[in-house]
Amino acid sequence: MEVRVVLSSDDIVRGLKHYRRIAKQDVLRAPETANPEAFLRHAEARREVYAELAEIAERAGPQDVVHAALDAYQNLPFATGSNDPAHVELRARENALENFFLMIGLEPKVRREARSLRPSLAGAVDPEAGAASAAEDAGSDREAAASEREAGPNAP
């Protein structure tokens, strides 16, 4: 994906520090919200993304940080619209990456292309469980499907 970046690494780091401060304010405001735990987790996850991107920007060039952000975005499962509390961090990471794309002036076409490559939430591998868990799940799904075929469509 061809990406044109007009900001320097210093500009990117400065912008990310600003975003981190906003997320820090959200961390401090969390107890005052209707759902403090979710609000806190969302703010902390955003801060983490901004810190990761700032670290890349400090040690590499602007192109590298943009490509790292695009890769992270492409590998992030869709959780938009999900009200499941388990997906708060996914939505926060998505939000943080999209804020970053706005900050650097990423062309909407590039963001849409990256978004189109993202996996569905149902097909995503739980990063904490790892690939072994996904393989086990696939095996149990195959076993359940085989049992359904053997039982027939009218089985209780």
Image (cartoon, rainbow, N blue to C red):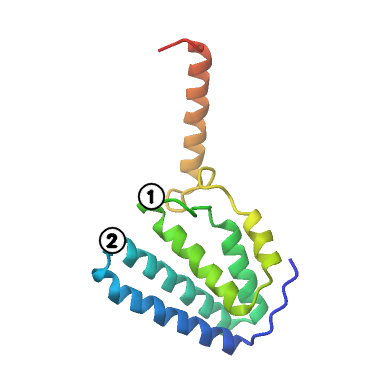
Q: Residue at x 51, y 46 (%)?
A: 131
Q: Residue 56 appears in which quarter of the rendering?
A: bottom right
Percent coordinates x, y for residue 129 in the rendering: 43, 48
**Distance of label 1 from label 2 (alpha carbons):** 13 Å
- Mark 2 surroundings within 10 Å by alpha-carbon count, few (fewer than 14), some (14 through 19), many (20 or more): few
Question: Does residue 9 appear left or right of residue 41 in this picture?
Answer: right
x and y percentages locating residue 133 in the rendered image: 46, 42
> Which label was assigned to residue 35?
2
Q: In this view, does 8 lie to the left or right of 152?
A: right
Label 1: few (<14), some or many (≥20) within 10 Å? few
Q: Tell which residue pokes out farthest to the left in this image.
A: 31
Residue sitting at x 47%, y 24%: 144
Screen quadrant of the N terminus: bottom right
- Relative to residue 124, is residue 135 depicted above or below? above
Residue 86: x, y in percent?
37, 52
Name which residue lies at 51% across and 63% down: 94
Amino acid, disc 2: Asn
- State the SS at label 1: loop
Q: Quadrant of residue 4?
A: bottom right
Of 42 and 147, the residue lying toward us: 42
- Name the amino acid, label 1: Asp
Q: Which label is found at residue 84? A: 1
Residue 106, by quadrant, is bottom right
Q: Is label 2 in a helix, a strand or a loop?
A: loop
Above or below: residue 19 compared with residue 34? below
Question: Is 50 above or below relative to 134?
Answer: below
